Amino acid sequence: MELSGGHIVVQCLKDEGVEFIFGYPGGSVLHIYDAIFHQDDVKHILVRHEQGATHSADAYARATGKPGVVLVTSGPGATNAVTGIATAYMDSIPMVILSGQVPSPVIGSDAFQEVDTVGITRPCVKHNFLVKDVHDIAETIKKAFYLATTGRPGPVLVDIPKDITDPNIKVPYKYPKKVNMRSYNPVVVGHKGQIKRAVEVLLSAQRPMIYSGGGVILGEGHKELTELTQMLGYPITNTLMGLGAYPATDKQFVGMLGMHGTYEANMAMHESDVILAVGARFDDRVTGKLAEFCPYAKIIHIDVDPSSISKTVRVDIPIVGEVKPVLEQMIDLVKESKLKPSKPALEAWWQLIESWRSVNCLDYDRGSLFIKPQFVIEQLYEVTRGDAYVTSDVGQHQMYAAQYYKFDKPRRWINSGGLGTMGFGLPAAIGVKLAFPDADVACVTGEASIQMCIQELSTALQYHTPVKIINLNNRYMGMVRQWQEFSYQSRYSQSYMDTIPEFVKLAEAYGHVGIRVEKPADVRPALQEAFAMKDRTVFLDFITDRTENVYPMIEAGKAHHDMKLRLAPGTPLDRELS
Amino acid sequence: MRHIISILIENEAGALSRVAGLFSARGYNIESLTVAPTEDASLSRMTLVTRGNDEIIEQITKQLNKLVDVVKLIDLADAPHIERELMLVKIKTNAETREEVKRMVDIFRGKIIDVTPASYVVEMTGQPSKLDAFIHGFEEDSIIEVVRSGPTGISRGEKGLHL
């Protein structure tokens, strides 16, 4: 079969089984867009800004496990995509980005819409390519998908100069079934001896703790993680990226850990003597002060990426491999082992954990006259029966969603954990809804974040992706305001906007439904009404308590056992200022 | 501690900037970097001299290995090895100093490869410390120009870094 470069690009995507491309046309990709016009197999989703394309594709990947695909033009198309590429990179999300480039003969001449895309994206992709010959397109795209989805996943960019997709130059096309790269051989199976050692240490623990991250979700190891945890009877905590890998409603789950983790999770980490870290990377928001991180613990670390091991925290037993096969091996070894977890030690350990749990660190003022953001998330959880896909932006609302929506399944909690990208939530919700049209999809956001990609409301109408936007509107950049309250004597420098749009009208202008909610009593009925409108995108604008803070909190530079807890209601910090 | 990391990398456009970019992005220091194709035209060999404690060097080698274009690498400092650097030096001369400069070059087993009435160009290879010693043997104002390749190295014994 002889095809032009533009048609080869689209045919490759078809052969790769791609369902959606999220993109935006422009000069350098016109040949590819013409090829898209000639077929219906790969559906193109026209976004309103390239950042939206990357977030939608990214969230599609997070929700389905399949790689997300993006198509943008050269120059500004590519630079607009960079934030979304970096977002995917930080959270190890498989994504393939195809970018147009100016024609090969003019590369380097500062041509119209020329930018060194390969150079700009190099630090925030797993790998990138510049295609120099039409004959190389198919193999390069195959490599891109292979790299994006294997080992530690990540975004891979393929930059394609316009002359390479010239409709007049046709070459034989064959999509390679597989590719081999001598320089890339990710480790799959962990070292047997290390796994054996790890199991011995795990079984002889007095105060064990399982700490799992996004790697368990990416590596599809949630069933094995749950089985191993329940077999052992050990407490488990998840990172922000790992929520849903272990059912949050199970009694062995002690909540999220880290800066806004629960008191019991952080205290248990601090006091534990053996930590099993699975697919987690000891991020600074998780560890707090490194010098005082888990001072009594032997640490076992399973990760597919060797460079994650002992990067910030020295590990005692490293295991490089994919989490699923390694956990499977561990389960077998635990079953075979004569060594059993010490019952008295475990009982004493759980008693201690229950005493921390009884602090009830996530409690808040339920009698407030104002809508508490935590209350909205609790109601969202109940109205959606805990079964929605929840995307979020970045800030206080993100932490409330992570703390109060109890995720029992993996791939339901979709947020920008590593890069912390405001603007992620709405395009992400659209990507998820396209993948799962029948599921409830909620975008938990705030009035600052939502405005960073609000134009995607238009995309939501065009492709009929009826998501529910849960806007926790506190008239502040809440997390910035919170830090300014704690660390800058409440000097709220630039964390407030006095011209917030009327979101109800804005939603209506985009062809959607807008509902403003001002009283606690109206929260649940409004949510019920919104989720009952199955075929409409609904923008719920909750006017929340503007002074509410996220608790508990480990302030920057402090250790796990040094948490700031919420003061009792009525103390000055908790008073309503508005 | 000083480490000499020897890298086999795909001979592709941009491979060098991936390595250089990694070092600047992660705040590692590069003392010197040399790169050229090998006997296999599809591969380049890179020799990179860096400094850091064991943890940093461990991270550097892991991060380098993570680059998709990097095929293999070794830290030469881990085992007996040979290290050489090439230097070209342009030295001011005149009728009075010519003999003395020539003697110095002979002592250091260098070669004079260009001569004008007012200058010599000297070629010299050796351990970086030997090249330093040669330079220090001259008054500062008699040196017109120094060009050094940065060290390159190879392990001792029959084993080698290849595919």
Image (spheres, grey):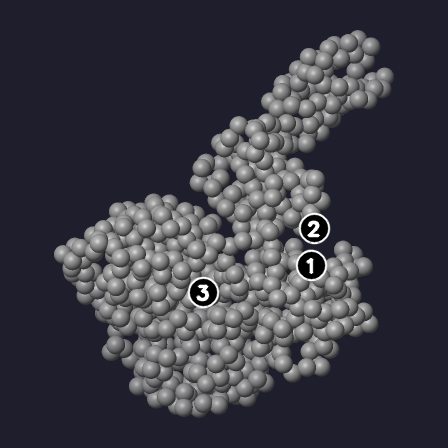
Kindly check if marks 1 and 2 are in contact, taking CB atoms under 8 A apart as contact.
yes
Q: Is mark 2 on a helix, strand or loop?
A: loop
The secondary structure type at the circle numbered 1 is strand
Task: Return the x and y of residue A260 as percentages of the image width and height.
Answer: 34, 62
Find numbered disc 3 in the image and state the secondary structure of the residue it sits on: helix
Identify residue type, mark 1. Answer: Leu
Residue type, mark 3 in image: Leu
Inter-mark Cα distance, 3 to 1: 28 Å
Instruction: Report the side of A255 relative to A506 (left or right).
Output: left
Circle 3 residue: A218
**In the figure, is residue A148 to the left or right of B135?**
left
Quick one: label 3 or label 1, which is nearer the N terminus?
Answer: 1
Residue at the spot x=29%, y=80% of the render? A369
Which quarter of the picture shows residue A458? Answer: bottom right
Does mark 1 fall on the same chain as mark 3? yes
Residue A114, compared with residue A409, is above or below; it is above
| Residue B103, quarter of picture | top right
Dots 1 and 2 on the same chain:
no
Residue on which disc 1 sits: A130
